[in-house]
Image (spheres, helix red, strand yellow):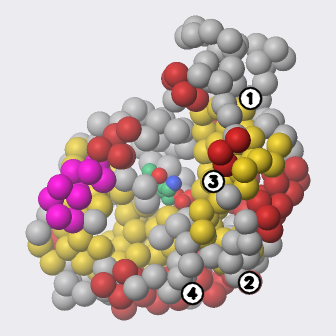
Amino acid sequence: RTVYVNGQYLPEEEARVSIFDRGFLMADGVYEVTSILNGKLIDFAGHAARLERSLKELEMAAPATTEELLEIHRELVKRNDIDEGMIYLQITRGNPGDRDFAFPDPETTPPTLVMFTQSKPGLAANPVAQKGLKIISIPDIRWGRRDIKTVQLLYPSMGKMMAKKAGKDDAWMVEDGTVTEGTSNNAYIVSGNAIITRALSNDILHGITRAAVLRFAREAQMEVIERDFTIAEAQAADEAFITSASAFVMPVVEIDGAPVGTGTPGRIALRLREIYLDESLKTAI
Ligand code: PMP
């Protein structure tokens, strides 16, 4: 695989980042994951806009313009001959040459930019969508700026492991009695024809797939309600599902051992998955 690091395209074995990089020592970095379908980037503009916001919120310098980032994305997709999969981008606050809590001067410590592709043949036709996910609920004990897409992913990793140990697929996180989001996705329930999902705030990541799916749902005359919901309400709902750049729209069929609806993927979730794949391909670049 050819990867990108700080201006260079290299075989992955040759790519290097300093042990003093603040991404490594302090999880001081942000990232984006963009999906690739038919060799094209899905919603690149959305990911680029969120990246810009994450950098700004953390007072971190941008190592490249959006146009330059697009060029690198395309070059990596081409060099690795990716038809379906993901492309990962990470920007950390660079290597100040020592360990110190204070942010280094970006003039002397430029950010580190790393990018690599992940080939996932069959991503769009993922058979898991016909089966649905079984999830557990866990307390949300993350920090208070979940709207910034940082590489601080230890708790989401622990959440995935808790699910795995319980023989389930994933976890939804709960704070003050209501669901915030999934470990790596946004959470939804369906009641009648209404799609219910938590409103945007610092409590959740502002999913790029979430924005697109809600827009497509409204365009298809479905009702969208942005509000908190509990696990009990989700268990009693007609349907449940998640969205993310790599899962697109994925039905949830069981929560903490209780079936959701009929315990099979919901009609609206599957329809939204279809619409999302169709519509987002039209604007892929
Ligand atoms: N919430 C969290 C915590 C996530 O990690 C992700 C995926 N990165 C999402 C939501 C979904 O965001 P997106 O649709 O932009 O992939």
* Segment tinted magenta in the rendering: 159-168
- Mark 3 Cβ and ligand 1 under 8 Å apart: no
Q: Is residue 220 above or below residue 214?
A: below
* Distance between the alpha carbons at the discs numbered 2 and 4: 11 Å
**x and y percentages locating residue 101 in the rendered image:** 55, 10
Mark 3 element type = strand
Tell me the tag on residue 88. Answer: 3
Identify the mark nearer the N-term, 2 or 3.
Answer: 3
- Residue linked to disc 2: 282
Q: Amino acid at mark 3?
A: Tyr
* Residue 226 pos. (x, y %): 43, 63
Labels 4 & 1 near each other (Cβ < 8 A): no
- Within the image, what quadrant is residue 171 found in? bottom left
Using the image as rendered, state which of residue 190 and residue 64 is in the foreground: 64
What kind of element bears circle 1?
loop
Distance between the Cα atoms at labels 2 and 1? 34 Å
Q: Residues within 10 Å of mark 2 (few under 14, many from 20)?
A: few
Distance of label 4 from label 1 (alpha carbons)? 38 Å
Report if residue 126 lies within the magenta region: no
Q: Which one is closest to the eye, mark 2 or mark 3?
A: 3
Q: Mark 1 highlights which residue? A: 111
Left or right side of 64 for 146: left
Is 227 positioned to the left or the right of 6 in the image? Answer: left
User: Residue beneath label 4, please?
Assistant: 275
Q: The N terminus is located in which quarter?
A: bottom right
